[in-house]
Amino acid sequence: SAVISQKPSRDICQRGTSLTIQCQVDSQVTMMFWYRQQPGQSLTLIATANQGSEATYESGFVIDKFPISRPNLTFSTLTVSNMSPEDSSIYLCSVRDSEAQPQHFGDGTRLSIL
Amino acid sequence: EDKVVQSPLSLVVHEGDTVTLNCSYEVTNFRSLLWYKQEKKAPTFLFMLTSSGIEKKSGRLSSILDKKELSSILNITATQTGDSAIYLCAVWDGSSNTGKLIFGQGTTLQVKP
């Protein structure tokens, strides 16, 4: 399966600031996704990153708060904007190589907001 | 509303024990059910189950899907301390063409020496 690199691995940020998380894959993949895992919770899909067009957001997530880019088939970014302590979570990038294949996850970014 | 429910939420066993983790789902457009193991941050893929009644096996781990009962089990035999982790069940929602996964709450397994 594809090797997925996520940066940064962790960060501590001040409230009101923004952070961009990068996801790099070592091969072209069809689908890229961004998930959030709040403390003690399971994973929730934020959005599907679409190559060359606007991301598809799930209910409860908006582009102004979580802008996403996907300039090509191997790279995507998620920005967490105007952060508050409630945004403290693990953010995970996942990819699916091709149709009918499982999603594989990057190592995640642990984000803490002070 | 589509949902995935796992039980138990937590489990403590001793090395050598056998454990069974449960996952039930109510997803309108079911495509597949997946199991992941999460030790630190990244969930690692274990199994993907699409057909009912066919067991998938990898070493001491095995899993089976029952589409009639809308459920799946994950078995771990001869547990080791390295099996301590959160086990996540997810259902691939086929209602969109993106392949959205709906996750359960997870089962936290602790294996004591």
Image (tube, coloured by chain):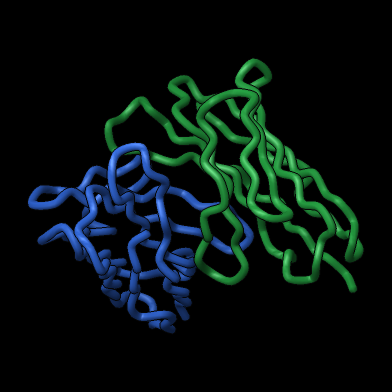
Chain colours: A blue, B green
> A15 or A105, which lies in front?
A105
Query: For the view shown, which residue lies furthest in the top direction?
Result: B68
Residue that appears at 35% across and 25% down: B95
Q: Nearer the viewer, residue A3 or A41?
A: A3
Q: Is residue A7 left or right of residue A51?
A: right
**Quadrant location of the N terminus of chain A in the rendered image:** bottom left
* Image side of residue A64 versus residue B46, left or right: left
x and y percent of residue B19 in the render? 83, 49
Residue B11 point in image, percent of width and height: 83, 54
Going 47% across and 20% down the picture, which residue do you hit? B28
The image shows a total of numbered marks equal to: 0
* B74 versus A9 height, above or below: above
Closer to us: B44 or A80: B44
**Between B7 and B37, the one nearer to me in the picture:** B37
| Residue A78 at x, y percent in the picture | 27, 64
The residue at 34%/73% (across/down) is A6
- Residue A85 as seen in the image, left or right of residue B107: left
In this rendering, would B16 be left or right of A66? Answer: right
Whether A15 is drawn above or below A27: the answer is below
Looking at the image, which residue is at 37% across and 57% down? A94
The picture places residue B9, in percent across and down from the top left corner, at 75, 49
